[in-house]
Image (cartoon, coloured by chain):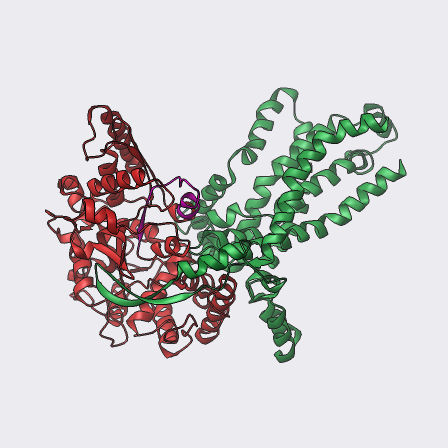
Chain colours: A red, B green
Amino acid sequence: MNNILRSVIAGALMVAGTATSFAACGISEGRVSIVGNEFPAIQTVANGALACAGDGVEVKSNLTADHQKINVPGMQGDPAEYTSAIIANSSIVALMNEDVIRPLDDLVAKHGQDIPQNQLITINGKVMAVAFMANAQHLTYRKDVLADLGIEPPKTYEAMLEAAEKIRAEGKAEFPIGGAYKAGWNLAQEFVNMYLGHGGEFYKAGTAEPAINNEQGVAALNVMKSLSGYMNPDFLTHDSNATGAEMEAGNVIMMNMWGSRVGRLQDDEGAPPEIASNIEVGGPLTVGGGSDPATTLWWDGWTVAKNISDADAEATFLAMKNGISPSILNDETMGQAVWMIDGYKPAAVNQGVFASIESGATAYPMLPYHGLMHTALGNELADFMNGKEDAAKTLADVEAAYVAAATEKGFLN
Amino acid sequence: MKHKTFFWFVLPTSLAMLLFIALPIVSVITQSMYAPHKQVIVEVESCGVFGCKKSTMIDQDATRELREAEPLGRFVGADIYTNRNHLASNEIAVAWESSAGLGEFLGDILNLPFYRALAFTLTFTFVVTPLVLVLGFTIAVAVNSIPQMLRGPTIFLSLLPMIINPLIGSLILFWMVDARGIVGALLQTAVGDPNLSMKASTPLTWVMLIVYGVWHSAPFAFVVYYAGLQTVPKDTLESAMIDGASRWEQIRYVIVPHLIPLTTFITLMQLMDNFRVFEPIVSFNASAHATSLSYFIYDDLGGETRLLSSAAATSVLTIAGVAILLTPVLVRTWRDFARR
């Protein structure tokens, strides 16, 4: 609640402050309206863009966890309600599928020469988004508990299971592993990680036909089942907010956690100091003897809507560029993410994400039909985790559900 | 009433019903029979933060022509209704052929998402509705017999569950039944099983949702019955008392028959309300154990790729379900009306 309050106040101050800042970002007129997810790093970027408001320049933002439900409808109108959507590599696909974002090449040529090439997300030769941070899930653990028991921080899921058994046997924690296995998006994400870690491919080469009902799929599900034996029995209702809270409460010792969320676990809110100061990040975990880690790489970036006037598009580009300029970095914002911004100095908490990038992990698939696969996984995997079905049956169900949805959407015949 | 007067009298209502009920239904039915065009997929190279790799995307220029030629999409008739994610006619036929017994056949059917959602929706509707009627009536009779002075505060307190927003109300219960919550911990002690978790078990999740449903809706039945109790004819009750009827007999032979029309009304409202059970499933994070038709629609519209035709088909099936459910009650009401 405090965080919400704080961001509301910060937002209010920002708006109040706009009267004095004259067209600070080189914008003379235009309308900027941002929609995006709600976590600290994105709030920082939005605040940076809000600072551009002034005479004839209107800037507003709508940051919410439900952003994916509103960004496409909010950009389909003409003119679009939102002139910019902050998205990740998974969610840009929905915007591209509906053709609601514009190529940025002309604006980059005019105003964005200083944006490094690797931040420009280029699809089919056209710049479609500008990335500003990287993210990944990686090991997060309690160093005091592991050190007490003489356990090295695990590098594989098999080692994590061994460590969990030891922690439980020693009575340090009944459910030492945290897992964001909430039925739906989270559960599907954990399967995507685990399946890629086993070297799996989601589709038959070059087609939208599913290909997950195989050895790797079964192996991935079995590892997830073994892990769940060390999780709070309510794991099918836990998202990463809940696993984070469990770690802050001292109930969870090890988990696969989003790099962007660890900072909040280590701060002085929520967890008592003796727990918070002992929360440490590790690299991504591998599984089943594979060399690729069982995690996916993510970027967050911003886009510009298609159905808006050129003046609004230009204003949006400049405001968003100001939102990711070096001026937004300070002591408080530095550790919020792995920023791709000049002047960013990695903090200890960011090492997990860097380790994930260096380990050669794959980026989360950016395919037009993968959202349907993710949804099908999220809906069907719970039956296996509940013990209602075996792995092969569950994977067959996932494929069947995906095929029905992909046929409806016109991806399959 | 003259025909002309009658016409002008009902015109505003009819227009509103046409606009807000009939048209949306026609629109939903239309949308459920059209699906998006075949997507033209092209292989592209996508580059970014983590290097370049081969990927695919929709060829918007090619797809745009198709869209402009047929803006509604491609006509698929009943395909969406019969596919696996809805009525699953093929899957049911296969299950019928292959399953050894009725049990296995039912198991196969309940593995299909639509039927799973329907099973919970119907169970919820038919368990919660009678319980709400009985509980609401009991509270109303009890409140009606306490001293006048205490009635105001009691009525206020009894109405609280209905005043609380369903999402918040179910979230409160969700935390109470958590393994570390007051109800969850109490149950663990009572049963003597420290690992008991209501959220991890399908039957207990169903019980939890049903308890929530009754808790939330009982005040509605209570307040309607309480109003009804104020209209029970005093002289009939007094004559019953003079004839030596006990309190139970007064309720059974005077009050209950007097309140039958209200019972029909509450049943109607509750059947409709409970058939669209949705909020508690979201708040309880219960989708691993229980889904409802409304949740099913929400899920189609909430994913990264929205399935509009699928959501429309489920909506039409839900409307059909409500119609079937209400028919007996409506027929009964009509008969009562015709008899007068």
Q: Is residue A353 above or below residue A331?
A: below
Image location (x, y in percent) of residue B266: 70, 39
Q: Is residue A79 above or below residue A172?
A: above
Q: Is residue A67 left or right of residue A48?
A: right
Q: Is residue A224 left or right of residue A53?
A: right
- Residue A233 seen in render: no
Which quadrant, please, contains the N terminus of chain A? top left
Q: Is residue A118 above or below residue B27?
A: below
Image location (x, y in percent) of residue A407: 51, 66
Q: Quadrant of residue B20?
A: top right
Of residues B143 and B28, the one nearer the viewer is: B28
Of residues A323 and A263, the one nearer the viewer is: A323
Magenta stretch: includes residue A74: yes
Of residues A68 and B267, the one nearer the viewer is: A68
Image location (x, y in percent) of residue A72: 41, 48
Residues drawn in magenta: A71-88
At 47% from the left edge and 58% from the top edge, which residue is drawn? B65
Q: Quadrant of residue A334?
A: top left
Q: Is residue A79 left or right of residue B99?
A: left
At 38% from the left edge and 69% from the top edge, which residue is drawn? A225
Q: Quadrant of residue B152?
A: top right
Of residues B315 and B222, the one nearer the viewer is: B315
Image location (x, y in percent) of residue A33: 33, 38
Magenta stretch: includes residue A282: no
At 30% from the left edge and 41% from the top edge, which residue is drawn? A313
